[in-house]
Image (cartoon, rainbow, N blue to C red):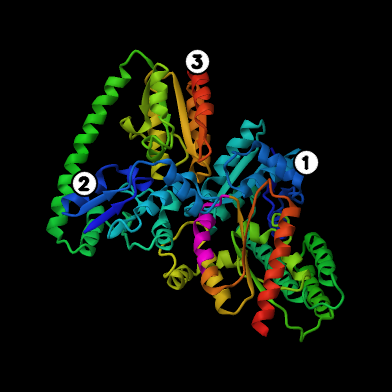
């Protein structure tokens, strides 16, 4: 049995978790390739024109997987373990996926307000005819791998933060940060310009509740906390990347910008979409690095 | 500082909201009619990617602030999943950055919160607040009833434009009424006048359903009077989404459950806002044999954009004419008119084919 996972949007929320989990369950996993021009084009063509760019990319990945596997895994992420909500657009993704592709969709509702994560996975396992024990074992193995990866990330962060170069933090959602085609190799570009790039994800979270409006979005709270943490260190600049038409970022940006500017750190806001040109991007980054 | 209250304009409901404050003895500056100038001004200081109603609200506030208002009353939905949750905070922040210092009062959509915030600002007694709220609700109901009557009469009236002339006059008068006794008389009088309008009762007219986001659907200025335009072209417009519907859903909590049951084949979760309701209404109208559906939404509204592919699917399955209009500060009336005219032709063809 082959399960397809679109390498976009939800995937990057917990990279490597889902593919490892299904592999540990004894399934064959087919990941869609890293985003490329073709995927974006098909995504943009099929999507609602006003949907956010990240969603459009997701449809592209979904269509790439069509017919190549037995079913495609599209979870319905509602709340995380802190009982905070995901982006409301995630709520409807499985239903929209069903309209878009003919390959059966494998889905389960992850709502930790109502049900523990392990329990939901068990239900998912049932759909795949796996026993509770098998699911539990697979989960333990996967979590171990994930922990290792996170440990590595932590070490890398402390290396980076003690570096002598100009330090720039990139603030965005994981699906914009780690998808290099979408963010036009932002990290690499900045490194070439002689600065150390720190992704907001790599920063260990500061659990103290800041004075910020209480976000009911998991990423909102996380990003604000991490910004509070990183601003304690010496930072040369901050760049926020948003997908075009991202509704959540319209709110988040207001507060990120305020916080960063209050700390007197230069701030650059970039919006990416299918028309973003490399040349324009490079110029703005160069100008920004020059100013700091 | 004596509080001089203002609030966001919302169609003809503005009349009722104004009454609420007046009855409490609070000084109130009612927001002026939204114009393209208002919208441009609001959009100038609003976050670029934020949804449209926020920008209109800001424009309304700015006008009222210039007239002397110093306190803003704004409703949010602290239990919802959509961006309305952050309207108050963001508007407050944006206004401050633009150099204004309003006292921003954000209230959640529940009775307790509304009561205490009203009490704090007006220092009125419990009975006074209760009475004012009752009067406000009565006016609100009358506005809705008149709008519903107009939807029925417009395509059937013999003298064109009679009902709209009457309504304009009535809303102006309604705004000035500040005694409940006068209100009861006025209500009787206006219903009598409405029933005196000569209509062609036997005329069979095509029916169009209006669905979508509550703010754009209920504010005739923001949606370029879609309802009136269609009515004058000879269509009976139906619209279930209004403030009463929304308030009822807050009280009768099982309504959401019923809606979810109906739309299960299409969407198995809430998507925030009134996303589910749009699907539910479209299914209902399709079943009832309507001849067209118009979907109104602020551009990039998260719930409505999410459900739009589903609405399009229903449209493809049933063949019912469907038009989705996104509204924002860049949309011009001429563009909307062209699309409406094309839609009118499609609906007329559909209707004629159905009858043949």
Q: Nearer the viewer, residue B203 or B347?
A: B347
Under circle 1, the secondary element is loop
Give coordinates of residue A143: x percent, y percent.
19, 44
Of tags 3 and 1, the one toward the viewer is 3
Q: Nearer the viewer, residue B60 or B183?
A: B60
Residue A145 as seen in the image, left or right of residue B124: left
Q: Give the residues in magenta.
A: B300-314
Corner quadrant of residue B269: bottom left
Give coordinates of residue A62: x percent, y percent.
38, 53
Corner quadrant of residue B126: bottom right
Under circle 2, the secondary element is helix
Give coordinates of residue A206: x percent, y percent.
33, 32
- Tell if the residue under mark 3 belongs to the same chain as the one under mark 1: no
Of tags 1 and 2, the one toward the viewer is 2
Q: Is residue A103 visible?
A: yes
Chain containing mark 1:
B
User: Residue sitting at 62 percent across and 33 percent down?
Assistant: B96
Label 1, on which residue? B67
State yes or no: residue B312 in magenta: yes
Give coordinates of residue B200: x percent, y percent.
81, 83
Label 3, on which residue? A290
Chain containing mark 3:
A
User: Residue sitting at 61 percent across and 49 percent down?
Assistant: B74
Quarter holding the N terminus of chain A is: bottom left
Q: CA distance from mark 3 to mark 1?
A: 46 Å
Q: Are marks 2 and 3 in contact (CB under 8 Å)?
A: no
Label 2, on which residue? A20
Seen in the picture, residue A249 relative to B110 is either above or below; the reply is above
């Amino acid at each position: 049995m082959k399960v397809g996972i679109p390498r976009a949007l939800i995937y990057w929320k917990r990279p490597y978790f889902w593919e490892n989990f299904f592999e540990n369950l004894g399934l064959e996993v087919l990941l869609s390739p890293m985003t490329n021009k073709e995927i974006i084009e098909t995504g943009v063509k099929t999507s609602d024109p006003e949907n956010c760019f990240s969603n459009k990319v997701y449809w592209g990945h979904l269509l790439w997987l069509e017919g190549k596997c037995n079913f495609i895994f599209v979870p319905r992420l509602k709340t995380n373990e802190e009982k905070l909500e995901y982006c409301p657009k995630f709520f409807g993704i499985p239903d929209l996926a069903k309209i878009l592709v003919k390959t059966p969709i494998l889905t389960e509702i992850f709502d930790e307000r109502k049900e523990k994560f392990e329990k939901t996975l068990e239900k998912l396992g049932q759909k795949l005819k796996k026993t509770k024990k098998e699911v539990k074992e697979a989960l333990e193995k996967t979590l171990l791998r994930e922990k290792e990866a996170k440990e590595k990330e932590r070490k890398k962060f402390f290396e980076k933060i003690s570096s002598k170069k100009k330090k720039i933090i990139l603030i965005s959602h994981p699906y914009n940060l780690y998808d290099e085609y979408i963010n036009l190799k932002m990290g690499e570009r900045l490194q070439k310009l002689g600065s150390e790039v720190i992704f907001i994800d790599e920063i260990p979270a500061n659990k103290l509740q800041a004075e910020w409006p209480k976000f009911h979005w998991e990423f909102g709270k996380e990003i604000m906390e991490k910004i509070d943490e990183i601003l304690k260190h010496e930072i040369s600049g901050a760049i926020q990347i948003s997908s075009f038409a991202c509704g959540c970022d319209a709110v988040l940006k207001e507060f990120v910008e305020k916080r960063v500017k209050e700390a007197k750190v230069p701030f650059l806001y970039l919006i990416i979409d299918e028309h973003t040109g490399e040349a324009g991007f490079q110029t703005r980054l160069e100008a920004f690095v020059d100013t700091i | 500082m004596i509080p001089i209250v203002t609030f966001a304009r919302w169609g003809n409901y503005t009349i009722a909201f104004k009454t609420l404050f007046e009855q409490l003895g609070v000084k109130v500056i009612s927001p002026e009619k939204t114009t393209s100038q208002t919208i441009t001004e609001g959009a100038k200081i609003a976050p670029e990617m934020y949804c449209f109603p926020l920008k209109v609200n800001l424009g309304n506030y700015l006008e009222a602030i210039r007239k002397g208002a110093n306190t803003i009353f704004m409703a949010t939905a602290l239990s919802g999943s959509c961006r309305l949750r952050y309207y108050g905070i963001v508007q407050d922040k944006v206004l401050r950055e633009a150099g204004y210092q309003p006292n921003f009062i954000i209230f959640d959509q529940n009775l307790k919160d509304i009561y205490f915030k009203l009490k704090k600002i007006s220092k009125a007694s419990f009975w006074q607040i209760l009475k004012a709220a009752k009067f406000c609700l009565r006016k609100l109901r009358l506005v809705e009833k008149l709008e519903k009557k107009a939807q029925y009469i417009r395509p059937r009236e013999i003298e064109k434009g009679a009902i709209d002339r009457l309504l304009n006059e009535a809303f102006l008068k309604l705004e000035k009424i500040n005694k409940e006794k006068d209100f009861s008389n006025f209500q009787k009088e206006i219903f009598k006048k409405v029933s005196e309008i000569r209509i062609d009762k036997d005329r069979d007219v095509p029916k169009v359903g209006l669905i979508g986001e509550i703010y754009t659907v209920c504010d005739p200025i923001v949606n370029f009077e879609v309802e009136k335009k269609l009515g004058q072209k000879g269509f009976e417009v139906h619209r279930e989404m209004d403030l009463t519907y929304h308030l009822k859903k807050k009280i009768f909590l099982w309504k959401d459950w019923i809606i979810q049951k109906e739309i299960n084949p299409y969407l198995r979760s809430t998507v925030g806002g009134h996303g589910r309701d749009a699907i539910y209404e479209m299914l209902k109208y399709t079943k009832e044999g309507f001849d067209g559906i118009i979907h109104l939404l602020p551009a990039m509204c998260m719930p409505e954009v999410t459900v739009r592919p589903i609405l399009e699917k229903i449209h493809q399955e049933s063949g019912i004419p469907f038009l989705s209009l996104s509204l924002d500060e860049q949309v011009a009336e001429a563009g909307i008119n062209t699309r409406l005219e094309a839609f009118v032709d499609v609906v007329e063809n559909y209707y004629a084919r159905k009858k043949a």
